[in-house]
Image (cartoon, helix red, strand yellow):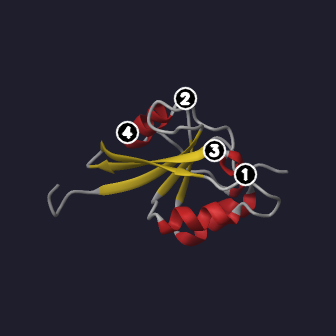
Amino acid sequence: MTDDSKTIRIAVPSEAPGGLTAPRSGHFGRCECFTMVDLVDGQIGQVEVLHNAPHVDGGCMAPVMVLAEHQIDAIVVDGIGGRPLMGFNQVGIAVHAGLGSDVQTSVDAFAKGGLPVVGLDGACQH
């Protein structure tokens, strides 16, 4: 990797054991883990798995802070509530709507710029 290469770290809520072939989880707050992928100049680099803490009511901000600590630049989700969406916005993590059934499909679409940003109007209402 050269000094002028561009690395973006994305997280995809996924089912255990995680990784590129893992099924994507339907909702950020209840996923088993996050598959974290470094895109270096648009190419997949390092892949890591971070296990999610059990979801409790009102506890959906904890994963936001953990992902911020892991220097995530963007998260790709199927569903997310308004509170964690605002939390991601506050810590500078972009939230994108995912596609496909596995992590690899979403990562490839993200790398090509094909995933829209989720706004408050797209947040889950529950």
Question: Residue drawn at (40%, 35%), measured in percent from left and top?
Answer: 108
Alpha-carbon neighbours of circle 3 within 10 Å: few (<14), some, or many (≥20)? Answer: many
Q: Which residue is mark 1?
A: 123
Q: Earlier in the sequence, mark 1 or mark 2?
A: 2
Residue 78 at x, y = what percent? 64, 41
Which mark is drawn over residue 93? none
What label does residue 32 carry, if any? Answer: 3
Quarter of the image where the N terminus is located: bottom left
Q: Are marks 2 and 3 in contact (CB under 8 Å)?
A: no
At mark 2, the secondary structure is loop
Q: Are marks 2 and 4 in contact (CB under 8 Å)?
A: no
* Mark 1 to mark 4 CA distance (whole Å): 24 Å
Q: Secondary structure at mark 1?
A: loop
Q: Name which of mark 4 and mark 3 comes first in the sequence.
A: 3
Q: Is residue 113 left or right of residue 1?
A: right
Give x and y (percent) for residue 111.
38, 42
Mark 1 vs mark 2, foreground winner is 2
Q: Write the residue at 58% across / 46% down.
A: 33
Circle 2 Cα neighbour tier, 10 Å, few/some/many (<14 / 14–19 / ≥20): few
